[in-house]
Amino acid sequence: MSLPRFRYDRFAWVAFLLLVAVILFSAIGKKKNSFADGVEVVVTPLESGDKLISERDVRQALLRSFGNTLEGTELALLEVERMERVLEEDPFILDAEAYVDQHNVLHMSITQREPLVRVLDNTGGNYYLDRNGVKMPASKNFAARVLVATGNLAPYTPEFLKKRKSSLKDLFNLTQTLLKDEFLASFIQQVHVNNAGDFILVPLIGDQKIVLGSTRKLDDKLKRLKIFYQEGMPYEGWRKYETINLKYNGQVVCKR
C-alpha cells in the first residue's frame, strides 16, 4: 500500500499565510497600544474662501464632547466614528471624516454647509438656509455674502420644504432660481415679503422695487424682467422708476 505523497509546496504556502496573519495581528495590536501623537484639523473653505467654523472651533467641540485634548490618548480608545457623528451635529458642518495615519496622528477633515440665503424675518428670526434647506445660525466668524430675505416669512420648521403652501418654501425655491441665472444672481441683493404676501426684489443698482407678487409663473416673470433691463430700459432709466411690477400677465408696469 502506497502512502499519500507529502506536498511541501502546499505546506510552505500555508505556513506563509500563517506568518502573514501573525505579523498582521501583531501590527494591529501594536498600533492599538500606541498613543495619538497629535491632532490635525482641516476645514475646507466655502467657494468664497471663507469659513463659518474654524479649526479652533472644531478642537473645542471635541474637547467638550470627549473631555481631553486627544493627544496622548491610546489609539484603541479613540472613538473615531463617534467623533464624526458628534461633529456632524454642528449646524455649520455637513460632513466630518476622521482617521489615524501611519504616524499616529489623528486627522479631522471638515466639509462646511454652504449658506444659500440669510433670513431676517418679522418675528426676529436671524439665520441662514443652506443648499439643502437646513437651518444654520449666524456665524461669529463672518457674515456670508448671500442673498438676504426679510419681511413676513413663515417660521422655520425642519419639514418646511414638504409643506404644500409656505412662504419660506417659496423663498427657498425663488432663491435657487435666481442663483441659477448669472445676471439675476449678481443683480438681486434682497428679497422682501410684504404683509400682503407679495415677493419684492431689491436690485443692487437703482432705487426701484421689483414686485413679483406670488412665485407662480416665476420663470415667465423673471424672463420679462431680464428683457426689460437688458433691452427695454437704458442705463439712465435704472434710477428713474420707483416700482417695476411683474404681477400682470405679459406686462411690465413701471411707476415713477
Image (cartoon, rainbow, N blue to C red):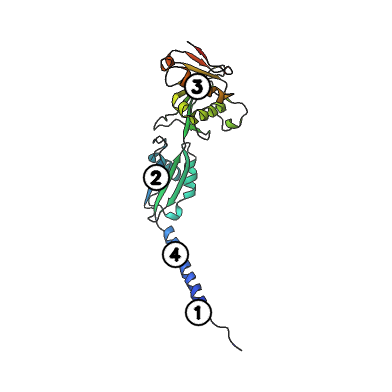
Q: Residue shown at 42%/46% (left/top)?
A: 108
Residue at 49%, 73% (x, y): give it: 13
Q: Nearer the viewer, mark 3 or mark 1?
A: 3
Give the numbered dot on residue 227: 3
Q: Is residue 149 visible?
A: yes
Name the amino acid type tagged 3.
Answer: Ile
Label 2 Cα neighbours within 10 Å, binned few <14 / some 14-19 / many ≥20: some
Asked if marks 2 and 4 touch (Cβ < 8 Å), the reply is no
- First in sequence: mark 4 vs mark 1: 1
At horizontal 44% and vertical 27% (from top left) the residue drawn is 186
The answer to which of 222 and 94 lies nearer the viewer is: 222
Q: Residues within 10 Å of mark 3 (few under 14, many from 20)?
A: few
Secondary-structure class at tag 1: helix
Q: Which residue is mark 2?
A: 41
Element at label 3: helix
Above-or-below relation of 135 to 216 = below
Q: Which mark is residue 8?
A: 1
Tell me the kind of residue under disc 2.
Answer: Val
Badge 4 is on which residue? 26
The answer to whether mark 3 and mark 1 are in CB contact below 8 A is no
Rendering coords of residue 44 (x, y %): 41, 41
Measure the alpha-carbon separation of dots 3 and 1: 85 Å
